[in-house]
Image (cartoon, rainbow, N blue to C red):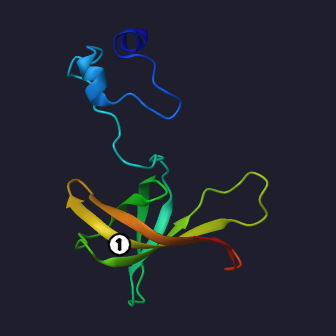
């Protein structure tokens, strides 16, 4: 990193060095993975989920792979078409001293769905709220 700063200067407090800048400075050799381009950090959180197509009462089960403020990557039981509206309920990891557990309930739009060894579906979160085990909304966006 000192080599990068010596060649391109020290970035200001709100400026991050980009992949292109690092390549030009000779810090990266081309074998490194480019930095994350998403606007939100993704957190590797594996939780059980229930999901359903909006206006359909039947839930299916799956798991989260990662979660960010704007979306989730989830394991689903089938391919889902892009643009499909889903309600996803995530069993949030319990807090150590919590008397009740939380559930994240999110309204989502399918961005893509891919099949490999498992079916991975990326969804964009349009609205979410946390509910306690008593089903009362405690935080909503």
Q: Quadrant of residue 123?
A: bottom left
Percent coordinates x, y for residue 101 in the rendering: 69, 65
Mark 1, residue position? 109
Q: Residue at x 79, y 54 (%)?
A: 97
20 left or right of 59 in image:
left
Element marked by disc 1 = strand
- In front of the other: 107 or 25: 25
78 lies left or right of 125: left
Residue under the point 42% across and 60% down: 71
114 versus 42 height, above or below: below
Above or below residue 75? Residue 85 is below
- Image side of residue 77 versus residue 99, left or right: left
For the C terminus, give its image quadrant: bottom right
Q: Of 78 and 103, which appears nearest the observer?
A: 103
Q: Position of residue 128 (x, y in %)?
A: 53, 71
- At horizontal 39% and vertical 90% (from top left) the residue drawn is 55
Q: Is residue 17 above or below residue 47?
A: above
| Few, some or many residues within 10 Å of mark 1 (<14, 14–19, 20+) | many
């Amino acid at each position: 990193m000192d080599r990068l700063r010596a060649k391109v200067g020290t970035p200001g407090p709100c400026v991050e060095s980009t992949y292109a800048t690092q390549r030009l400075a000779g810090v990266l050799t081309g074998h490194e993975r480019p930095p994350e381009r998403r606007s939100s950090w993704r957190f590797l959180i594996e939780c059980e989920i229930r999901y359903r197509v909006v206006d359909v009462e039947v839930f299916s089960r799956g798991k989260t792979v990662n979660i960010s403020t704007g979306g989730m990557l989830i394991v689903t039981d089938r391919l889902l078409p892009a643009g499909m509206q889903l309600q996803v309920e995530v069993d949030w990891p319990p807090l150590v001293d919590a008397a009740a557990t939380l559930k994240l309930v999110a309204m989502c739009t399918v961005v893509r769905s891919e099949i490999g060894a498992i079916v991975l579906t990326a969804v964009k979160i349009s609205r979410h709220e946390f509910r306690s085990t008593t089903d009362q909304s405690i935080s909503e966006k």
